[in-house]
Image (cartoon, rainbow, N blue to C red):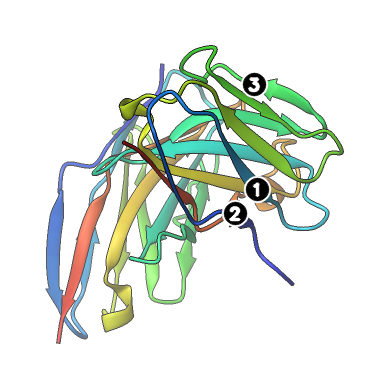
Amino acid sequence: AQTVTQSQPEMSVQEAETVTLSCTYDTSENNYYLFWYKQPPSRQMILVIRQEAYKQQNATENRFSVNFQKAAKSFSLKISDSQLGDTAMYFCALRNTGNQFYFGTGTSLTVIP
Amino acid sequence: GAGVSQTPSNKVTEKGKYVELRCDPISGHTALYWYRQSLGQGPEFLIYFQGTGAADDSGLPNDRFFAVRPEGSVSTLKIQRTERGDSAVYLCASSLTASGSVSTDTQYFGPGTRLTVL
C-alpha cells in the first residue's frame, strides 16, 4: 500500500521569504513519481513540480524546488521569494507503477503581505 | 488550448436521487481519472480510463457508483441512490498517456463539481 503524509496542516510565510512544505511517503515500489500540486480557492489543481524517483537530481521549476531524499522517503517543497499568488492548498502526491495517484491531506499556505 | 472542464460546477440533490457528473478532458488525452475530495482531505482515486475502457476501478466505493467513457473522450460519473456521505467535490483529470513517462502521464485537473446531498 502507498501512503502520503503531510504533517503541516497550515503554514504562513512573509511575502518574499522562503518556505518549505514537508511530505513523507511510503511505498514498496522502486519506480514511482512524486508531485506537488497547488489548489487555490478556485478548486483547480495546478501542477507545481514533479520528480522521477530514479533521478537523484532534485527538480527545480523557477521559484519552486524539491528536496528529494529517497532513502528517507521524503519529498519537501521549497518556495523561494514567496508571492501573494502562492496562497493555496498544496498537495503532495505519489504515482505508482499501476498509474494510481495517492495524495496527502494537504498544507494550507498563506503568504502574508 | 482548453483545459479539463467539468459540469455542473455545483449540484444539489436530495438523498436517494440519481446524479450524473460530466468531464471533458483535454483534447487528445487518452487517460482520464475521477477523484473524490472530501472537506479537508486530499483527492481520493475512484477510477481511471485508458481510452474507452476502465483500466482501474478499484477506488469506486460501492456499486452505486459507475462511470463511462463511451467514445474515449467525455466521461460521465453516475451515482445512484445518493447518500449524504456522497457529498464532496468530484475532480476529473486527464493525461496524454498512462504509459510510464512522467512528462506525458502528468495529470491536469478540472475545477471539480461540488455535490451536495441533502
The amino acid on which the numbered mark 2 sits, given as a three-letter code, is Gln
Question: Which of the two labelled residues, at mark 2 and mark 1, occupies the earlier sequence position?
Answer: 2
Gap between marks 2 and 3, in whole Å?
A: 21 Å
The amino acid on which the numbered mark 3 sits, given as a three-letter code, is Asp
Q: Nearer the viewer, residue B20 or B14?
A: B14
Q: Relative to residue B83, is residue B109 drawn left or right?
A: right
Q: Relative to residue A91, is residue B106 drawn left or right?
A: right
SS label for mark 3: strand
Q: Nearer the viewer, residue B107 or B72?
A: B72
Tell me, yes or no, if residue A24 can be seen here: yes
Classify the position of the C terminus of chain B by image quarter: top left
Find disc 2 in the rendering and name its residue.
Answer: B6
Task: Count neighbours of disc 3 (C-alpha within 10 A) and say few if under 14, some if 14 to 19, many if 20 or more.
Answer: some
**Pointer 1 chain:** B
**Pointer 2 chain:** B
Find disc 1 in the rendering and name its residue.
Answer: B23
Question: Which of the two labelled residues, at mark 1 and mark 3, occupies the earlier sequence position?
Answer: 1
Residue lying at 50% horizontally and 57% vertically, measured from the top left: B9
**Pointer 3 chain:** B
Find disc 3 in the rendering and name its residue.
Answer: B56
Q: Nearer the viewer, residue B117 or B90?
A: B117
Q: Relative to residue A71, is residue B90 drawn left or right?
A: right
Contact flag, marks 2 and 1 (Cβ < 8 Å): yes
Splitting the image into 4 quarters, where does residue B21 fall?
Answer: top right
Splitting the image into 4 quarters, where does residue A42 fall?
Answer: bottom left
Task: Count neighbours of disc 1 (C-alpha within 10 A) and say few if under 14, some if 14 to 19, many if 20 or more.
Answer: many
| Image location of residue B43, percent across then percent down | 41, 40
